[in-house]
Amino acid sequence: GEDVEQSLFLSVREGDSSVINCTYTDSSSTYLYWYKQEPGAGLQLLTYIFSNMDMKQDQRLTVLLNKKDKHLSLRIADTQTGDSAIYFCAEWGNTGKLIFGQGTTLQVKP
Amino acid sequence: GAGVSQSPSNKVTEKGKDVELRCDPISGHTALYWYRQRLGQGLEFLIYFQGNSAPDKSGLPSDRFSAERTGGSVSTLTIQRTQQEDSAVYLCASSLVSVLAGTDTQYFGPGTRLTVL
């Protein structure tokens, strides 16, 4: 079945870049997503990328997709303390369901 | 309201009791989704509704779980005879059009934290 894997924890200093990685198994994935979850809040869609793209940039966020290796990354430039949250990678394929990874906790130290 | 709302925000219950979790989607959204998030794990898809019908119930963990949606709006997720392993955050999301539209953004509610003692 489909599976999405992420590292569980990342710690960076304020102002540095953060890179959160994700791997997935479903080769039919059409869209891949990054969601942010702040404490006590629901998930917020940050960005998504279509599977025929290899890069998407949106302000401080850069998404890189290596379809051959089924690897997705989210780079946050100039990371701020407000970026501290759990980041979920998710993929959408032929099942019509979003399959989520277990989430990466990003800790930003001042 | 402006977003997806869920109630209650927290629910503590005793093992064996039934619980009902409620989701109010964004007005006009035809698709509604339920997910479960266990501590330290990713989101697990449970069920989705297109209007009032649920084409895919394959994610429901057992026959103790059921969900319904009425009037194309509010949905309730019912867990009968709760077990300790049901403890999790239950998240609801809604989207404007079809679940099959991959770019149709799902808007999530804040979740209901269920604790089964």
Image (cartoon, coloured by chain):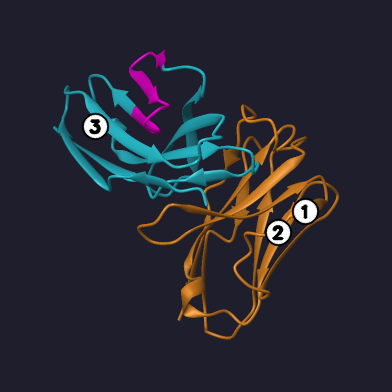
Chain colours: A cyan, B orange
Q: Is residue B46 left or right of residue A23?
A: right
Q: Are both tags, 2 and 3, on one chain? A: no
> What amino acid type should be assigned to the residue bearing mark 2?
Lys
Is-magenta flag for residue A68? yes
Q: Specify whether residue A97 is painted magenta.
A: no
The residue positioned 37% from the left and 13% from the top of the image is A59
Mark 1–mark 2 distance (CA, rounded to whole Å): 7 Å
Q: Marks 2 and 3, Cα distance to the nearest angstrom?
A: 40 Å
Tell me residue A101's x, y (percent). 42, 46
Identify which amino acid the numbered label 3 is placed on: Thr
Mark 1 to mark 3: distance in Å? 41 Å
Image spot of residue B11 (x, y percent): 53, 69
- Magenta stretch: give its range: A55-73
Marks 2/3 in contact by CB < 8 Å: the verdict is no
Contact, mark 1 vs mark 2 (Cβ under 8 Å): yes
Q: Are marks 1 and 3 on the same chain?
A: no
Determine the chain carrying the residue at label 3.
Answer: A
- The residue under label 1 is B54
Residue B33 in the image: above or below residue B78: above
Give the foreground label among 1 and 3.
Answer: 1
What number is the disc on residue A81?
3
Helix, strand or loop at mark 1: strand
Q: Identify which amino acid the numbered label 1 is placed on.
A: Ala
Q: Secondary structure at mark 2?
A: loop
What chain does mark 1 sit on?
A: B
Judging by the rendered image, the residue that carries numbered circle 2 is B57
As helix, strand or loop, the secondary structure at mark 3 comes to helix
